[in-house]
Image (tube, grey):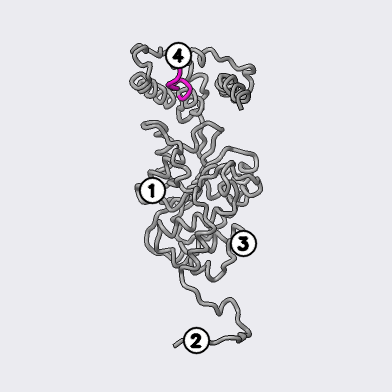
Amino acid sequence: MHSFDQASHFVINGLTQTDIRVDGDYGFNLLQKQMVEGASHDAGERHDAPKCYPQTRKAVLSNIMSWVNSDNDTTRIMWLYGPAGAGKSAIAQTTAEECHREGKLAASFFYSRFSAGRNTKDGLVATIAYQLCVSVPAVKESIIKNIEKNPKIFKSNIHTQMKALVIEPFNSVKSAYPKLILIDGLDECLIRKDQVEIIEAIAQALMMDRSSYLRVLLISRPEVEIRQAFNADSVSSLCTRLALDDTFSPDKDIELYLRSHFEALKRQHILSSTLSKSWPSDESICQIITKSSGQFIYASTVIHYISDPRHNPQKRLDVVLDIKPSNGEKPFAQLDALYSTILSAYRPIMDLKKKIY
């Protein structure tokens, strides 16, 4: 029989939070409420996430996986960076999926400027901790215990959260476990000082990791504040960098992407019977590659534009090849010109809708 059965109208003095016993469900429920459901690599919200086209970006992906599998404990962080449109998120998604298949992915978080919860630092550690409970069951007890010990842990700064919910639990595990935490699109965290705080907190946490096993892959544009954070001694000593530049021959990958998609278009488009085997010409493909300037997003946009089943692919390719940027000095002049052409084609439709409605 319980001590308080059928008791009423009583007062308990001197009861503190540590006197309250709760089971693991309480801590896990708190964690669930704080995590961001759409942020992981396999989240339903990201069901159409970009991935590397087969047989492309092989050198970059190989470089990343070699680092993930390395026993070198001095470079615990990799910073993969490049301009907008370089294919960073596709590389991140492909890496996450490969590591997941191989049992090496501990957690992932994909930032998005326009998605609530995925554009702040607030749910980052909770989301990582939740995924760790699944990918590394051995750390779940320690994570939940620390949450129940301090139910307001999610109001603490990110340094405290990383220590209590990631590093301390990992330090309690002696066997091998998935090692990679992947964070994509850090520059899409809206508050810039938070971007810096995240980098600093991760570096500080890894210095407390006695296992020397964890790896963190951070992916972003090379924004000023982010560059400065990675240049700090406390971070640079733990970090290796990987720039998405001409070293990895993006033009060859873009050519493979274009040729494969044009072949598929000639088989599947409703007007396929009007397309010759020699279409498009090598010269046309070379022109698109040149206009892409190493940006996969340009090539992808061209393919989507030309593949529209409501339009003639040959005429649309001619439009693309005829586009000339108004100012060639702009870094994304070709892409700007392409978008302007595409959007202008839809303006009459939008104007008509306004008149109707």
Write the residue at 44% across / 88% down: 1
83 sits left or right of 215 in the view: right
- Depth check: give the residue in front, 245 or 276: 276
- Three-letter amino acid code of the residue under disc 3: Ser
Write the residue at 56% across / 54% down: 123
Q: Earlier in the sequence, mark 4 or mark 1?
A: 1
The x, y position of residue 128, in whole percent, is 49, 55
Closer to the observer: label 2 or label 4?
A: 2
Residue 100's label in the rendered image is: 1
Q: Is residue 201 magenta?
A: no
Q: Quadrant where the C terminus lies? A: top right
SS for dot 3: loop
Closer to the observer: label 2 or label 3?
A: 2
The residue wearing badge 3 is: 156
SS for dot 4: helix
Residue 5's label in the rendered image is: 2
Residue 284's label in the rendered image is: 4
- Depth check: give the residue in front, 350 or 117: 350
Above or below for 319 versus 18: above
